[in-house]
Amino acid sequence: MMDIHLLLLLIVFLSFLFILKPSLCYASNKDICTRGRDFIDKDGREVILHGINLVCKDKNRNYIGPWDEGDFNKLREWGINCIRLGIIWDGLEPSPGSFSEEYLEGIDKFINLASLNNMYVILDMHQDLYSHKFGGDGAPQWAILDEGKPHIHIGDLWSDAYFTSPAVKTAFDNFWNNSKAPDGLGLQDHYILSWQYVAERYKSNPIVIGYDFMNEPFIGSDIDEVWEIMKKEFLKNTNLDLSAEELDELWLTDRMEIIEKISELDAYPKIIDSIEILCRRFEVEKLMPFYKRLISSVREVDKESLVFLEPSVLSNVGVYSAIKKIDNLQVYAPHAYDILTDTPFMSLSDLGRISMIMERHNKTSERLGIPMLIGEWGAYGTSEGVRDIALFMVQLFEELRVSETYWAYSQKVREDCDYFEAIRRPYPVRVAGSLKYYQFDRKENKFWCEWEESSSIKSVTIIYLPSLSYKDIKVLPDFSFRSERIGESDSGYIIIPNDAKSKRIEILF
């Protein structure tokens, strides 16, 4: 039997090797893996993923967007290094068990364009309102088991149908129950096999770094109980003299009165926390078993790609998630939206609510000990007056050192949008060691970044700058660096060699 002291020394030695040789965390053909709460590349450098969503929801185009080489070149100039690329179940599996090669060739085109522009790809199986049949996107016709219930959409927002449509709720219930499709196989079984097919196709592609298994998982008919609890909590914490029925009508016709009252009385956390038990039950009893089966199936063909697991859609507005860690390459991938998102009142979004949502997401990431990527945020579209809100989101990303993908390029983000500097912004792309902090002070127009270099990493640190026309740059301690322009644009990278010291860079634009 090995001497206990020798065994302890061996453990310490192996742990020491793990710390010094971050690239030993995996042997993979993928360019990105995880270490603790960080993304790292093959050289062991910490990586910040700053991305954008490309999702085509148009069935008439067979869910293949119009993006071309010019779009990808533009995104690279903006500093984008990651694409959350939507794939739609309806396009992928138009009939039971039959996968569309034509559809996947369309997806391949975007993956190739991403590769040419040094961008990673996360494949996102997107859905909204379960299916195109209900004005959204997602499941093919054969996978819609709504039992003939009516699709009732009351309210100004597309997402109101989650609350008002019996058909949408029933379709989700049957999915979570794995009810049988017309061919006798369960709906979840079909969905899982479609993901296995996708994983088999892209397992050897180094830039397809992972799979986001389901966009915004919805609770189904239990939303009725959720809504009743929320109404009771609202009426208990406000002084509005309304019945539950009157509150229903007011929410769907003039919800700003309700939201203003919530903000005025600081009632939002109480209302959100009142439904945590129901959301937890959904995640524990339905969502996590589904994820476990899905991951097991994907791992049969692909053991190296990241798996991006989203919580219940209600976590996106602040409900604590009960999601569990079930895979060593798992990423927590919530979205972060204020309750005014998609309304004409986005400029009135509450920074306190946004901060609370991000704080709770961060606590879940800490609990799980895995990286976090905010898969969607923003959705500002052509809204005016949202600049400060967008920059506040960026400030939170910088403070928490989290990765993110903005929603969405398909909303025609333009350089004249008042929030554009939240998209095209300086950040550390790859750090040859441990990133301590980074921040861009927009009032002083100054960028700081500090990191602790590792002697085991032989590669350089790379920092993206929206403009190489800076007034002054300092690398402390004094150190040489070079810059690299992106195409014909003024944007580019600062590239700093590694000499295993603590470094700080200060840039004045």
Image (cartoon, rainbow, N blue to C red):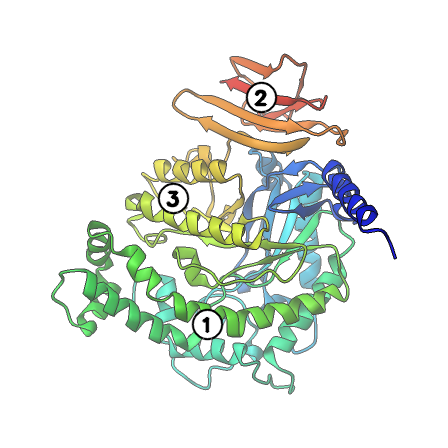
Q: Is residue 486 visible?
A: no
Residue occupied by mark 3: 382
For label 1, the SS is helix
Quadrant assignment for the N terminus? bottom right
Q: For the residues marked 3 and 2, what is the alpha-carbon distance in whole angstroms?
A: 37 Å
Q: Are marks 3 and 1 in contact (CB under 8 Å)?
A: no
Query: Dot 2, how many residues are within 10 Å of its Cα: few (below 14), some (14-19), or many (20+)?
Result: some
Residue occupied by mark 1: 281
Residue occupied by mark 2: 504
Query: Dot 1, how many residues are within 10 Å of its Cα: few (below 14), some (14-19), or many (20+)?
Result: few
Question: Residue 292: which disc?
Answer: none
Instruction: Name the image quarter holding residue 220.
Output: bottom left
Residue 294, image x, y percentages = 65, 69
Q: Is residue 422 above or below residue 307?
A: above
Residue 198, image x, y percentages = 70, 63
- Identified at 75% across, 39% down, the residue is 16
Q: Is residue 253 visible?
A: yes
Q: Is residue 237 above or below residue 381?
A: below
